[in-house]
Amino acid sequence: MGGPVAPGTGWPDDPADAATPVATSPADVRSLAVGSAGLAELTARQSVCRACPRLVTWREDVAAVRRRSFLAEPYWGRPIPGWGDPEPAILILGLAPAAHGGNRTGRIFTGDRSGDFLFASLHRCGLAAQPTSVTAGDGQRLTGVRMAAAVRCAPPENKPLPQERDTCAPWLAAEFRLVAATLRVVVCLGGFAWQALWPVLAECGYQVPRPRPAFGHGVQARVTGPGGAQLLLLGCYHPSQQNTFTGRVTPAMTDTVFHLAREAAGLG
């Protein structure tokens, strides 16, 4: 029977259980995000959020109906928490999970064409253990890298509303603070992620330039954080099928960004 996975019922790498508190409003998100003691607690709380009614309805309807090619598979159908190295030097920030990718598998950029393109590049650059990422629990590991989405739920037509982005922002800000000590580089996949990052940086005490640098593939910006910490921001075209099929972004272009990120992060 289709529908979202109940927390703590055996899904691989499910961070939550039946006792995990659930956010049902923007105020709840802010409170539960700030009140998370560490990444494990934060990811658990992210993974059961219900603060955006439109997104909750959409992601759960997709999980119930399912795509024909995946009818025999269960769908995660919940928000997708951040994933990867708990002490990352590089954060990869995307837009939102795909309806039949992360929303199905329970892990960001896992089980769809965008993820195939992205993980192949990360593997070539020495940042991922495997060139593919098919399901949660498939053995994929990231080296010095963490992934997150600006909006944690799959949105209709891959287009979150501004208020949904803003409601979700405290989850990202809390995650950012918890990894800031080791973080050296943020790679933004697409203009939405690039724009969503700036308010989070300001909230976390980074000096945000005015005007903000415009997004573009290969664009670089440096910001200074609390205590003088330096952070490099890199723009990268999103590995959507529209971009990869038309050649707007190629494997070589993506590899160049991740090689630069790896070097700047001091990962060898």
Image (cartoon, rainbow, N blue to C red):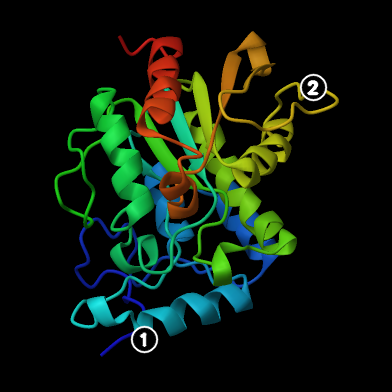
Q: Residue 84 occupies which quadrant of the picture? A: top left
The image position of residue 201, as x and y in percent, is 68, 32
Is 172 above or below relative to 7? Answer: above
Q: Tell me the distance, in whole angstroms, between the alpha carbons under discs 1 and 2.
A: 44 Å
The residue identified by callout 1 is: 64
**Residue bearing the label numbered 2:** 209
Q: How crowded is mark 2: few (under 14 residues within 10 Å), some or many (20 or more)?
A: few
Q: Residue at x 63, y 64 (%)?
A: 28
Query: Are dots 1 and 2 in contact, CB under 8 Å?
Result: no
Q: Seen in the image, is 128 located left or right of residue 89?
A: left
Helix, strand or loop for disc 1: helix
Query: Which badge, 1 or 2, comes first in the chain's sequence?
Result: 1
Specify few, some or many for label 1: CA neighbours under 10 Å numbering under 14, 14-19, or 20 or more: some
Which sits in the foreground, 140 or 16?
140
Q: Would you say residue 88 is visible in this rendering? A: no
Q: What residue type is labelled 1?
A: Ala
Looking at the picture, which amino acid does disc 2 mark? Pro
Image spot of residue 96 (x, y percent): 51, 56
The residue furthest right is 210
State which quadrant residue 131 falls in.
top left
Question: Would residue 152 be seen by someone viewing this image from the given angle?
Answer: yes
Q: Which residue is drawn at 33% across and 70% down?
A: 76
Q: Quadrant of the N terminus?
A: bottom left
